[in-house]
Structures are given as structure tokens and as C-alpha cells.
Amino acid sequence: MGTCKSQKQNKNSVNQINQFNLSTQFPKLKDQIHFFDQISLEQLNQPDLSTFLSKHINKHRIVNEGKTWIAVNEVKCILNTKTTILIRNFIPETDAAIQLIYLLKQLISVSIGAQELQVDFNEYAVELFHYFQAQLIQISIEVLLAVNTLMKKQEHWWNDNYFSWRKNYIQSMFKIKQPDVEKVEFILPFFEYIALLKECAKQFCNKLKSPDLIAIDIKAQQEVLEQFYTQLRTGFLQNQSIQADSINWEHRMTSNQLEQRLQTYTLFIKKKNSIS
């Protein structure tokens, strides 16, 4: 009887977790992040974790309300505490978890650089950056869940296709290719996806934010070139005019000198004839 009752309670708790609203049960964003750290994927009971997290981030307007870095930094703090535990138990799984944490920290560092440049973004770049921030939050939570999975040596809930559609979408939006990465055991899908997000962040930092912005930059370069060539042509014409004036002046001087010499020679001939 006791076992049956316990199983029934567990089933009810799963249904409750599927149906509850994180924002009402955990009003603070930090509490929501800690919930993801403590919950097991069996309790989440989500066949598509990626879609679930995406809907959660959009529904609670984490990006739109400027809470991106609160969420990301909270994940980072939790992972920092786990690192001390991981380095004491060196096995392939913990090694992969440490690498995953390091990769996420690299991504966050590059993303902060992009954040500092957002004041110069145009409307299209702002839209792109909002999507990028949503992916940054989602991958942070996914790394947290993956580290817990590796620490507990549980079955991996990600596979080679887990990030597939998201990678394709980002590549089409940012017009970039998937960077080549080394083969890393256990976390290769994460490794590839984080490498792609780093390329997106670098585009923002290099001000290659979108095809629209690239077109603007090209147009600006063309305007500068046009001004340069206009000035060059004007200077060339002015030089030609100066050269022409100089030639005309020299021609006049030569003609005057020749005329004076002819006059002098004529007078000399007349004088000589009169004497003879």
C-alpha cells in the first residue's frame, strides 16, 4: 500500500511540475535559475527540452526586461561552485564538465564585449542581438543541466541533432559558417554550438552585425571614395589649369622676347644700310 501511495504521489508531483508557472512559484529570476539547477529532467518530463526553455525565456521576457545578465551571471556563479567539486574527482565525465564550463565562460566574456557596443546598433542589429541574448541564456541553463548530468553520470539527454535546427537558424540569420572544432568526447554538440555563438558575438564586436549594416558600411565607404576622387579630379583640373596658364605665360614671354629681338635686328640692319 505504501509503495502504491508513494508512486501515486510521485506521478502527481510530475504533473504539478509540468503545469506550474515558474514566475508565480519563483518570483525572482535567481530562484528560477536555482530551480533548474536542482530539478531532475525526469521531473520536467519534457520531450523537447530546447523548446521548453525557449518558451520559458520568451514567456517571462527575460531578455526584453533586461535580465539577461542576471540570469547568465547566476548560472556562472553556480557553475563556479561546482568546479571545485569537479576538479577533485577527475574522470572523463568531470573533465568534459570542466571543459563545458570553460567554454561557456569564454562565450560570456565575448558576449559582454558585444553588449558594450549595442548603443551603436541599428534596429535590425538590436533585433539580432535580442535573439542572441535569448540563446545565451538558454545555452547557459543547458550547460548547467549538462554539467549536472555529467556529474551524476546519467544518460545524456542531448545528441548530435539537439542543436541542429538552432544552428541552421543562426547561420542563416548571421550569414556565417559553422567553425571547425576538435572532436570532444561527450560534449561535441555543445562544443560546436558554443563555437557558433562565439562567432556571432565576434561579428557584433567587429561591427559586422548584419547584411543591412554591412551595406551601410559599404555605402559610407563609397561616399568617402567619391569625395576623395572628386577632390582628386578637382585638384588635377586645377593643376592642369595652372600648367596651361604657365605654358601660355611662357609662350607670351617667348613671343615678346622674339619680337623685341626682331625689332632690334631690324633697327640694326637699317642703321648699317644707312651708313654704307
Image (spheres, helix red, strand yellow):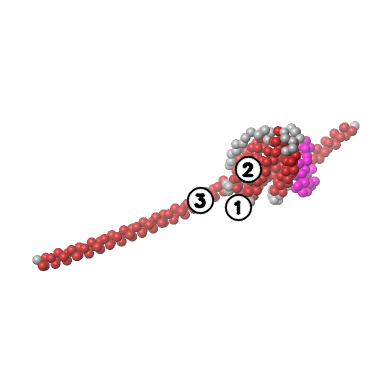
Q: Residues within 10 Å of mark 3 (few under 14, many from 20)?
A: few
Q: Which mark is residue 198?
A: 2
Prevalent SS, magenta region: helix
In-front residue for pair 174/178? 178
Q: Is residue 254 magenta?
A: no
Q: CA distance from mark 2 to mark 3?
A: 27 Å
Q: In this rendering, is residue 133 above or below 270? A: above
Q: CA distance from mark 1 to mark 3?
A: 18 Å
Q: Is residue 182 visible?
A: yes
Instruction: Name the residue: 69% across, 44% down.
Output: 137
Q: Which mark is residue 170?
A: none
Residue 88 placement (x, y as % from top left): 74, 37
Residue 20 placement (x, y as % from top left): 79, 43
- Three-letter code, disc 2: Lys
Quadrant in the picture for the N terminus: top right
Residue 272 placement (x, y as % from top left): 12, 65
For residue 145, what is the image quadrant?
A: top right
Residue 137 as seen in the image, left or right of residue 271: right
Instruction: Name the residue: 23% across, 61% down.
Output: 258
Of circles 2 and 3, the one toward us is 2
Instruction: Name the residue: 75% across, 39% down.
Output: 85
Residue 265 placement (x, y as % from top left): 18, 63
- Three-letter code, disc 1: Asp
For residue 252, what is the image quadrant?
A: bottom left
Dot 1 corresponds to which residue?
A: 120
Quadrant in the picture for the C terminus: bottom left
Which is more N-terminal, label 2 or label 1? Answer: 1
Dot 3 corresponds to which residue?
A: 221
Residue 213 as seen in the image, left or right of residue 247: right
Q: Which residues are magenta?
A: 19-44
- Three-letter code, disc 3: Gln
